[in-house]
Image: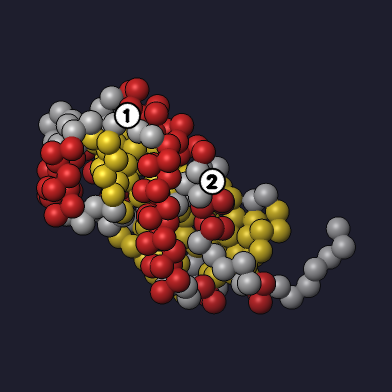
Amino acid sequence: MNCIIVDDDELSRAALRTCIERADFLNLITECKDAIEAQKFIRDNQVDLMFLDVEMPEMSGIEFIKNVEVACQVIIVSAKKEYAVDAFEYNVTDYLLKPIQYARFLKAVEKARQIYDNVRTEGSNSLLIKQDSKLVKLDLPNINYIEAFSDYVNIYTKTARYTVLSTMKAIESKLPSSEFMRVHRSYIVRLDKINTIEEN
């Protein structure tokens, strides 16, 4: 799951970063120091999960989820319990209290992963990607192969190429292994598109 941290406190970001690195199904793609920066990032990038602080300058975390269209799951991270009622009114996935305990963190992200997997299973015949500030649905049978391209991946269909900010690991995790295979560090191919395999 592609995740981001939104927190103005450097120590809090570092603590979260350490927890995220221990969870092999989480892929930290950026850290934002405030809600304004986060708003710009999620507009242009595919994010599955956001760890969001409440007390931040200019716009609080609660104001952020109240006023900004957020398509990803949100886990609130705060030193205060009193924001929890307001947070859950906006359908957040969970609420973590600082200082973060890893066991509690793991419980929250496992809950997020279960929701993510259920959504992915329901739409298992397609892949949602972010293009020009909108989500585009690619039908899996139309994908020929995927190529690593610096910090991006190129997704090739019969008629087009889509460039997406993502890691190969993150894309691979969204594809059914019965239909796609990572054949090289830089390539994933759709198995039913293979015509020949050379020995070398």
Residue visible at 66% across and 77% down in the picture = 192
Horizontal side of 160 relative to 31 (left or right) equals right
Closer to the eye: label 2 or 1: 1
Q: Which residue is mark 1?
A: 99
Q: Which residue is mark 2?
A: 24
Which of these two is toward me, 17 or 186?
17
Above or below, comparing residue 49 to residue 38 in the picture = below
Q: CA distance from mark 2 to mark 1?
A: 22 Å
Horizontal side of 64 relative to 179 (left or right) equals left
Above or below, comparing residue 142 to residue 174 in the picture = below
| Of the image marks 2 and 1, the number of the one nearer the N terminus | 2
Above or below, comparing residue 113 to residue 84 in the picture = below
Residue visible at 87% across and 63% down in the picture = 199
Residue visible at 54% across and 77% down in the picture = 141
Q: Quadrant of residue 188?
A: bottom right
Which of these two is toward me, 148 or 21?
21
How busy is the neighbourhood of tag 2: few (under 14 within 10 Å), some, or many (20 plus)? Answer: few
Give coordinates of residue 118: x percent, y percent: 41, 68
